[in-house]
Amino acid sequence: MPLVKVATVEQVPPGSALRVYVEAREVGLYNHGGQLFAIKNLCPHMGDALHKGQVTAQGRVVCPGHAWHFDLATGKCTSGQAEASVRTYPVVVQGEDILLEV
């Protein structure tokens, strides 16, 4: 699988989220507790941008539209409809570059 540079470490400090685009895919990039996660940025319920939601202490992003929760590590919906998961993308850090496996 190819790796695509999407940001630098400096652009995603701990506690932040960033919207990036990879080959026409909208991805939310999160730094939670110093660990980087990448998930599809659109909520499957109503298409809200997940990177605008708050991240819980348990590592779940809360959709700003209807408060569905998505696990950053697995993409699984932990509230709302359990079958409504979002895709995750492997994150690789090389030096200061953040790359996604797509």
Image (spheres, rainbow, N blue to C red):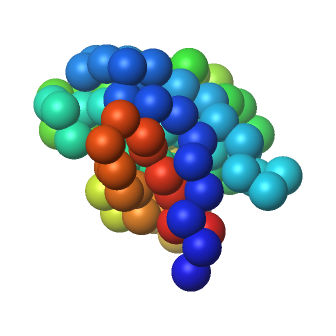
- Asked which quadrant contains residue 15, the reply is top left
Q: Position of residue 76 (x, y in %)?
A: 41, 61
Please tell me how many numbered marks the rendered image carries.
Answer: 0
The answer to whether residue 21 is seen in the rendering is yes
What residue is at 60 percent from the left and 73 percent from the top? 2
Does residue 9 appear left or right of residue 45 in this picture?
left
Q: Which residue occupies the foreground of this view, 78 or 87?
A: 87
Q: Position of residue 35 (x, y in %)?
A: 22, 41
Q: Position of residue 94 (x, y in %)?
A: 34, 50
What residue is at 36 percent from the left and 57 percent from the top? 92
Does residue 91 appear left or right of residue 20 in this picture?
left
What residue is at 51 percent from the left and 57 percent from the top? 100
Residue 7 vs 79, above or below: the answer is: above
- Tell me the quadrant of the picture where the N terminus can be found: bottom right
Residue 10 vs 93, above or below: the answer is: above
Q: Which residue occupies the foreground of this view, 36 or 83?
A: 36
Residue 31 vs 46, above or below: the answer is: above
Q: Which residue occupies the extreme bottom position in the image? A: 1
- Tell me the quadrant of the picture where the C terminus can be found: bottom right
Does residue 4 appear left or right of residue 82 in this picture?
right
Q: Position of residue 88 (x, y in %)?
A: 48, 61
